Amino acid sequence: MNSTAGYLEAVITLGSGSALRLLDAWDAEKPPVVRYGPQPRFGKDQLQGGGGLDGHGRGKPNVTMSHNDIETLARELLSAYETGQMVPIPPSARHGFDLSTAYAVELMLKRIRETEGHRAVGRKVGYANKAMWRALKLETLVWAHMYDDTVHYSENNSAALSVAHPRSLKIEPEIVFGLKPAFTGQGPDAAAALASADWLAMGFEIIDCPFPEWKFQPGDLVASFGFHAALLIGEKMQIRPELIPQLVEELPRFKVRMSKDGQFVEEGSGKNALKSPALCLAELGAAIERRFQSEPLRAGEVVSSGTLTGGHQIDRGDVWTAEVEGLPLPSLTLRLT
């Protein structure tokens, strides 16, 4: 299907990255059709799933979760993350849960992990696709923290990684940025976003969903570590000031070719991440500033800026390679062990 109309008729099951198969629907008047799976029904005084959101992606439930409820939910999701157990009832099917609650759970997870000796080193992006914002009534993209034990750097653009308790892993190619100053974002300004970055690189994010059949709502993703399992970062390209105008032009246009065990799987493009990974970085900075003024993107953070293709299943023994055309970045290869 190459026409916009064809894309608009597609039905997708919502999984991180899978929506990007509908990229040509970005500028269409109608959003893509999204299959969420069965939706729970609640009484009139209860919030339905992750719904009840206003047009800004901020929910106003009649029943709100208490601090103790948020901590209990965070520890449940942390246990599932650490053991590989499934979570049969997603948070969005529970009393008082909305997107604001999801971010409260995400910050609680960050605090718990920090007390256990881990360190948050960056953020990952979800829903870098405006068609999905319309379909899900989101104001902007979503995000979650990444940690020192999940972010890895390749040697000679190749690495073997393992995930301790895999459930249903998927792999996504992404442009990764390393920030030099704190960054809040000032609207859709790709050049300003690039000026805030010290380097960029090709990366692979491995994601894993704790909910059956990858059926979830945006708040479920946020509250579950953004489904982040691991990030592999390739060779860094320093972003010198004189390169920024050229990168502003190249980042929307560059291509990435994904292959598995030497066989071509899919070609993606920089435009698939909010029309440019740099614009995605700018949007993330602005979105975090609007929601959490005390938690801006900070110097030294790593940002994984959204998938460039659909998410593809990855199993132990698979070897995946991303070949880049249009940016001076080498290929990146990952083997899952």
Image (cartoon, helix red, strand yellow):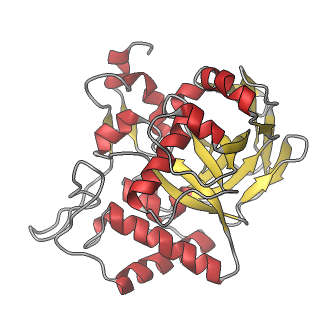
Image mark count: 0
Quadrant in the picture for the N terminus: top left
Furthest residue toward left? 44
Q: Report which quarter residue 118 is drawn in.
A: bottom right
Question: Residue 206 appears at what percent x and percent y?
Answer: 65, 50
Q: Nearer the viewer, residue 160 or 287?
A: 287
Furthest residue toward top? 3
299 shown above or below 84? above
Q: Is residue 337 visible?
A: no
Quadrant in the picture for the C terminus: bottom right
- Image position of 155 (left or right of 306): right
Question: Residue 329 appears at what percent x and percent y?
Answer: 79, 30
- Image position of 57 (left or right of 211): left
Q: Nearer the viewer, residue 19 or 254?
A: 254
- Image position of 318 (left or right of 61): right
Q: Report which quarter residue 306 is drawn in.
A: top right
314 shown above or below 24? below
Task: Please give the name of the residue rendered at 61% of the width and 76% of the height, measured from the top-left corner.
Answer: 113
Q: Is residue 289 visible?
A: yes
Q: Report which quarter residue 129 is drawn in.
A: top left
Furthest residue toward right? 156
Task: Please give the name of the residue rendered at 25% of the width and 75% of the height, measured from the top-left corner.
Answer: 64
Question: Residue 126 appears at what percent x and percent y?
Answer: 49, 47
Question: Residue 63 appears at what percent x and percent y?
Answer: 20, 75
Task: Please give the name of the residue rendered at 48% of the width and 67% of the height, measured from the top-left corner.
Answer: 294
Task: Please give the name of the residue rendered at 56% of the width and 78% of the height, measured from the top-left corner.
Answer: 111
